Image (spheres, rainbow, N blue to C red):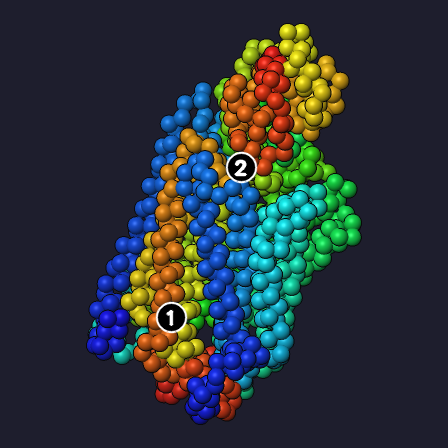
Amino acid sequence: MLWASESPEQNMRRARHRTEWLLVIGRFAGALVLLTGLLLTVHLCRASSPADNPIPSIFDTHSTPADSIRHLSFFVLVITGLIFLVVFTLLTYVVVKFRSRATDITHEPAQVYGSTQIELAWTVIPILIVVVLFVATARVIHAIQDAPKPAAALEVTAIGHQFWWEFRYPALGIVTANELHIPVSDPAHPTPTFLKLLSADTDHSFWIPQLAGKTDLIPNRVNETWMDPRSTGIYIGQCAQYCGTQHAKMLLRVSVDSPEDFAAWTHAQKQPANQDEKEITGRRVFENTACVNCHGIGGMATTGRFGPDLTHLMSRRTIASGAAENTHDNLRLWIKNPDAIKPGSLMPAMQLGDGDLDALVRYLETLR
Amino acid sequence: MSSDAIAIRTADATSQPWLDTLHGWVTTVDHKRLGILYILFALFFLVIGGIEATVMRIQLMHPHLSFVSPQVFNRMFTMHGTTMIFFVAMPVLFGFANYFVPIMVGARDMAFPRLNAFSFWLTAFGGFLLYFSFLGGFGLYGAGNAPDVGWWAYAPLTARAFSRGHSSDYWTISLLVSGFGSIGTAINLIATILCMRCPGMKLSRMPLFAWMNLVMSGMVLIAITPLSAAQIMLLVDRYLGAHFFDTQAGGSAAIWMHFFWIFGHPEVYILIIPCFAFVSEIVPVFSRKPIFGYPVMVGATVCIAFVSMSVWAHHMFTIGMNSYANSFFAITTLAVGVPTGIKIFNWLGTMWGGKILFKTPMLFCIAFLFQFLIAGLTGVMLGVAPFDWQLSGSYFVVAHFHYVIVGGILFALFGAFYYWYPKITGRMMSESLGKLHFWLFVIGFHLTFDLMHIPGILGMPRRIYTYEPGRGWDLWNFLCTVGTFIQGIAILVFVANLIISYFKGPKAGNDPWDAWTLEWSVSSPPPHYNFATIPTVASRRPLWDRKHPEDPDSRYE
């Protein structure tokens, strides 16, 4: 029966008693779930070792901008947590204490219309809290955004494309894609990296949660961000501003190298492309098909910039902007049918015969 | 205050053939019928938007799932967002305003009944036009059918170079059309509230429901205008070769963001303020006390409206504004918390010392208070600009605004449905189904949206159709999906309750909740002309005065 035949009052009395306790239990359960979640999150953050960072948590930070955001966020979490506790307790108290009881169902409670003092109090206190929060916020905004660029800083230009990242090191003459290499920054002699952010097509956003907050890459606009990672390792992130069909697989990885490793990497990247005559067939395939329209290879007469530069393709761990490991099979599949790895990517299926395809892959594999 | 007219109308309705009934509904200019049409229209789209959400949640249940293609997923989140904001939330709130504002201020109809009908049909056809894109949106390259540019459609994704075919045109034109409908309704509500109040109903005696809808309507006029302007500019870009937002030709992507969010942020308050109105009517009745601090409630609402016009760029903290602009928008954003906090405290003050009845409408309102508190606090976190540089565009934001829209707006709306359904249909909704709906929805909601904050903290961006395994996101996404299904079941219970109660619910009578505003003085459903004789009021609670002649409110105001 949806509508019991007993009188509404009786029905109400019975239901009310059950409901109010269910309500309280429900609220506590909700709060518990939230708390458990947060604790688990913190646990997960701690679990990752510094050398390998599989979980890009914003609370497991390794660079000054991300650190100061984390400190600020803990401060904000404490304040909002306290507000939550106070109001939650009040709400629970009111709901339990002032529930209508069976005995006084016909009586109306005292009719109170307001109280200037109380209302003034709960206006002034929030204003004070807002002022405190704002001062803390403005300090961190200034510290991160207006940080001076030291002379030792490395400058990199990051250009967002649908759906990959181009990285150019103007001082070093290096062009690479999707995997950014930067030196570790010793707090005593900081060598931070300052990134100039541009876009070739739609909006994108550069986000490595463990190193810095995100900054958008917007066409016709120059943005900046910086980071000074204090420990080496791979840090992951991905495009954080919807940029089209394959926004999801516009992945990003930053390799923070020791000074020696970084020097070795830059040295290798500065070398011209391998001109191994053994793989001339594959090279001819590259030159004679549409490949050259989009991809550049150092030392070859190509002007393509629409796709990633391939001069040192094999120095990268992944292809297709992190969508697949850089293995022989994946490379072959990617050229044959990009949609199999990244449906909607702008790389066309090249429709090559098996012979040409294998020769091309063999040639690309010499580009170390 | 007799209600003889009702008998005549009911007799008429039963004898009409169905075609006449349909004709009557399509050509109606009656504010109550239009209100019901708005609400039914919104419920229809709520189900569609819900299905779109479910498709997304299934796709995200596990990493690297291919339940739908990326193209379809992108259409789903675009359509879900656009539908829920423009064709569910706005129409349903306009529906309640349409139905109850005239009755609450003691008028017989809206100020401009025909404009009212025109506005409704504009909104309705806007919605149908948007969904026609699934059929008509194929372009030259077969690129896209439904819009897939996201509900805020950032430039230059909408430029012809990136959005071929007509899908973006459907998005633009349907929002332009329904936007004009919204402006019409807003003008109508303002005129009704300012000019049609019954004798004795000074502005300071209006129910908060009318006050808050007045503020909301003012905001609609200010906020929808830049959106419409931007849509027209976008159309001119796409078809006449202008370069407002076409970055390939030197246009500005950031200008679109400003235009969109100077609409988009006030829009959040356009949606939440009518929900404040529901809560401000329901909480006093079920606490058996008048609203605590009426003047402060009105002041806080107006204050929210003003401040919310100056916070829009907090959606754009990551676009590289300078540190002064970021600081400015941080302080304005944090400042909104003050009047909002006042409201929460005043509702608490209303319940304090009352005798709280836990009927379904009140349950939803209590849950609203709790969830809106959390939504506000995560909003404070997002208003702290540096924290936002991490959280913006992540699942934390998705969780935050669903806390506002589902935990706040939808919960208040459900409360309004249970509260006013007896007035609209003349029958009570089932309390047992109502409680089942409430608890299922509470569980589903918290499972989905509490946990959704976590992948955001762990670096998961929004609007991705799939994600890499091993990033710590898998479990949370799976649980979110489970919660979605529980919410879906709860919605089915709600719809079943609406339908069953319509036929089988016990008769409600004029005043089932022992309430105090004018709509409860007329029959349920109200007669065609609402009031046989226009009432005269002497206080904010005219029915309290009538029920307690020995101690009327008018003595204290």
> Looking at the image, which residue is at 69% across and 16% down?
A284
From this view, report whether residue B380 is shown above or below residue A145: below
The answer to which of B101 and A176 lies nearer the viewer is A176
User: In the image, what residue type sits under mark 1?
Assistant: Ile
Q: Quadrant of the N terminus of chain A?
A: bottom left
Callout 1 secondary element: helix
Mark 1 nearby-residue class (10 Å; few <14, some 14–19, many ≥20): few
Circles 2, 1 touching at the beta carbon (< 8 Å) = no
Determine the residue positioned at 77% across, 42% down: B249
Numbered circle sitting on residue A248: 2
Do the residues indicated by labels 2 and 1 lie within the same chain of the protein? no
Instruction: Determine which quarter of the picture holds residue A15.
Output: bottom left
Q: Residue B221 location in percent, x, y?
A: 64, 65
Looking at the rendered image, the quarter that the C terminus of chain A falls into is top right
Chain containing mark 2: A
Select label 2 or label 1 by which is in front: 1
Residue at x 58% of width, y 79% of height: B27
Report whether residue A184 is seen: no
Horizontal side, residue A20 vs residue B379: left or right: left
Residue with the mark numbered 1: B499
Q: Residue at x 26, y 58 (%)?
A: A22
Instruction: Looking at the picture, tell me which residue is in the foreground, B221 or B181.
Output: B181
Q: Position of residue A334 (x, y in %)?
A: 56, 26
Query: Circle 2: is it few (<14), some (14-19), or many (20+) Cα within 10 Å?
Result: many
